[in-house]
Amino acid sequence: MSSTSTTTSAAEAVLRGDVKGLKRLLPFLGPAFIAAVAYIDPGNFATNIAAGSTYGYQLLWVIAFSNLMAVLIQSMSAKLGIATGRNLPEVARDRFSKKTSIFLWIQSELVIIATDLAEFIGAALGLHLIFGIGMVPSAVITALASFAVLEMQRRGYRAFETTISAMVLMVVLAFALQTFFAHPDWTEVGHGIAVPSFEGTDSIILAAGILGATVMPHAIYLHSALTNKRVVGRTEKEKKQIFRFEFIDIVLAMIIAGAINMSMLVIAAALFFDRDMRIDDLTVMFNELGSTLGPFTAILFGFGLLIAGLSSSSVGTMSGDVVMQGFIRKSINLYLRRAITMIPPLAIILSGVNATKALVASQVVLSFGIAFALVPLIMFTSNREIMGGLKNHRMTTAAAWVISFIVILLNAYLIVDTFL
């Protein structure tokens, strides 16, 4: 029996009430962990580290708020898939004109390429930092490794979910150990999470960078595809029950993603804030960790960067397939897609551009795609004709529009600030 049919049978047993206790969750765990990988991609590393080294623990609350936003947004995407049996691009194709669908497909592909650029370069940089080999050989090894991860998807979504979840766990362990070795002030950590505050204009700009980079367009598209046919509810009651279980999956995954992002900031704050060292380059961070806490801690950082890059890159490739199939009813071989998306990061690495600067630049390109994923998602999940009994509550819709406005405004500001 395939992993798909096994999971479906287990889920059906839960829906019938044949399974009790925590075991009821197991068939529904997985989709959110794949989507959550987008929230720990290498593009977030530099921003979190710069925030910690410059302002100490002060901006931890921004990451906490970002994660609350992510829970709401990803839950709407998952809910859309459960309610309709289709993913967000498919619903958009049915609701919008052909020209609009083609435009949405083109911009989403460009955003995914920009996202993949950050993830691929991050993984290659991780290899370079750990083993001291050149960036070009590191890029070649990263390419081969990403194909190996992608092979898990061909073997079924359950195998892919297990692989990605295991990689996320590796990143968690790597940063948990670094946090332990850094000996942070836990009282200050708690204060930074609980008490929102800023310190001058620059801290607001940095907070905008953290918030703006949180919502990832490809994660919004992908999550609806991960839930639309995984467990199919035959009635409104079953669909609501499935969503309740998937919501728990989302909360767990986002807590883990948030903890990883917070740990980056906490480590930088504990080690560099009191020394007045602003760290905004990942190579500098690696070297400073080595000189401050020893080579093992530096290797843990490089390892976390490598695994985060590999896992998020594979998820980006999966997202590209979803948007092409959804918006224009076309699909290409995943390995061919992976090879095509490798061309821009390989070209940048060969050109000798600073890896951290390339990561930051990719986040600006990514900012363009936020509105085109977020606005349709809110429109569709607020429509009873589309969603049935899973239509957004009025408070959910109101909160989603406020968050959408904040995120779009912040990303627009970051674009203007970058170019002007």
Image (cartoon, rainbow, N blue to C red):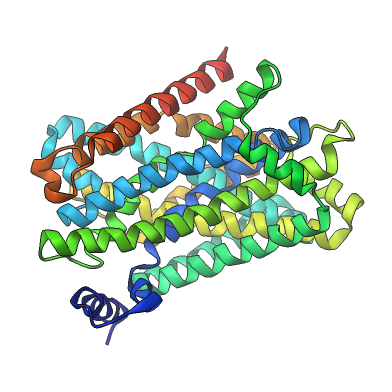
Q: Is 27 situated left or right of 43 in this image? A: left
**Residue 8, how many percent across, how many down?**
24, 76
Q: Can the viewer see residue 138? A: no
Residue 122 vertical position relative to residue 407 in the rendered view, above or below? below
What residue lies at 41% left-to-right and 56% top-to-bottom?
A: 250
Q: Nearer the viewer, residue 193 or 47?
A: 193
Q: Is residue 220 above or below residue 180?
A: above
Residue 418 as seen in the image, left or right of residue 241: right
Q: Residue furthest bottom?
A: 1
Front-lying residue, 244 or 210: 244
Q: How many marks?
A: 0
Q: Quadrant of the N terminus?
A: bottom left
Residue 254 at x, y percent in the picture:
48, 52
Return the x and y of residue 378 as percentages of the image width and height.
26, 36
Residue 98 visible from this viewpoint: yes
Image point (79%, 44%), residue name: 285
Q: Nearer the viewer, residue 78 or 279?
A: 78
Q: In this rendering, would 418 be left or right of 177?
A: left
